[in-house]
Image (cartoon, rainbow, N blue to C red):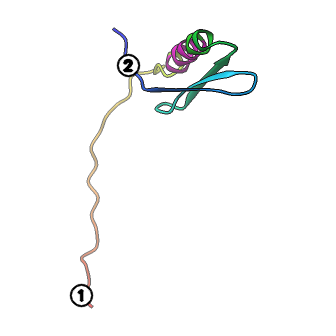
Amino acid sequence: MGKTYIVTVWEEPRWVVARCSEPDVTGQEFTRKEALDNLKEALKLHFDHLRATATPKIRTIEVESAPRRRL
């Protein structure tokens, strides 16, 4: 199942730039279609490297704070 992202596309003098601001990933090429395809591939690579190598352990901790002083 895919996820939908909001993408900004604009033209530079020699490039078409496609940028996804959340996460901050950009693709560029000579045409709009190529720039969007480049961005899609960049997003796949971005998230492919985010896989955890070990299952994280979630714990809770308790922290005692000093009582507030009145001024």
Determine the residue located farthest toward the bottom in the rendered image. 71
What is the three-letter code of the residue carrying label 2?
A: Thr
Q: How many marks?
A: 2
What is the three-letter code of the residue carrying label 1?
A: Arg
User: In this rendering, is residue 66 above or below 43?
Assistant: below
Image quarter for residue 9? top right
Q: Which mark is residue 50?
A: none
CA distance separating discs 2 and 1: 51 Å
Residue 46 is covered by the magenta coloring? yes
Residue at point 26%, 54% (across, down):
62
Label 2 sits on a secondary structure element that is loop
User: In this rendering, is residue 21 above or below 48?
Assistant: below
Image quarter for residue 24? top right
The residue range painted magenta reads: 38-47
Circle 2 packing at 10 Å, graded few (<14), some (14-19), many (20+), is few
Q: Which residue is mark 1?
A: 70
Image quarter for residue 49? top right
Residue 50 is covered by the magenta coloring? no
**Residue closer to the observer: 57 or 28:** 28
Label 1 sits on a secondary structure element that is loop
Q: Is residue 16 left or right of residue 14?
A: left
User: In this rendering, is residue 5 above or below 37?
Assistant: below
Q: Which residue is mark 2?
A: 4
